[in-house]
Amino acid sequence: MKFKREKLLSLISQFIKFSLVGVSNTAISYGTYALLTYIGCPYVISNIIAFIVSVLNSFFWNNRYVFKKNDGEHRNPWWTLAKTFLAYGSTGLILSNILLVLFVEKFNMNKYIAPLLILIITIPLNFVINKFWAFRTDKKNKGDKDENNRKKSII
């Protein structure tokens, strides 16, 4: 029972950290989107550029602050960055642009408010994808540890 509680508290803590990173990420993303849209860039292009900037910001902070590796775990940073772009690409680029066009064109929603409402859908989805896929770590092989220990004892 104690293990499940600790695991649940750890998951909640991780989601809170993810949300804090997300707040800063959202501010950067929305600021980029609003600025580009304001200066005349089409809103879908603004959203794509804001997406790229926000994914790079998100990767940096999630890798360092939210989904940290434990001892004995390995994660290839380049593959993780690629998976982060794929994860956010599916939700933050494809899904958000579909919803953005739908909200603005079909429901006549304000193009500055629509991206904020879309976050209600994409944030929880992004957490799940990032937690269980993009930032997943691999345990180092027990044989690798035994080999390393053998090498150390020889030296």
Image (tube, rainbow, N blue to C red):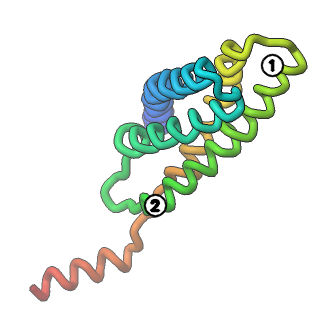
Indicate left or right for 9 with 153 as reference.
right
- The residue depicted at 61 percent of the width and 29 percent of the height is 123
Q: Is 85 situated above or below 19? A: below
- Distance from disc 1 to disc 2, alpha carbons, whole Å, reads 36 Å
Local SS, label 1:
helix
Q: Quadrant of residue 60?
A: top left
Tell me residue 92's x, y (percent): 65, 36
Q: Quadrant of residue 36?
A: top right
Tell me residue 91's x, y (percent): 69, 39
Q: Is 56 situated above or below 122? A: below
- The residue depicted at 62 percent of the width and 42 percent of the height is 88
Indicate left or right for 40 with 148 as reference.
right
Going by the picture, which residue comes out furthest to the right?
Answer: 106
Local SS, label 2:
helix
Going by the picture, which residue comes out furthest to the front?
Answer: 40
Q: Nearer the viewer, residue 93 or 31?
A: 31
Q: Nearer the viewer, mark 1 or mark 2?
A: 1
Name the residue tied to disc 2.
78
Q: Quadrant of the C terminus?
A: bottom left
Name the residue tied to disc 1.
104
Query: Badge 1 local density, few (<14 within 10 Å), some, or many (20+)?
Result: some
Q: Earlier in the sequence, mark 1 or mark 2?
A: 2
The amino acid marked with disc number 2 is Trp
Tell me residue 107's x, y (percent): 87, 15
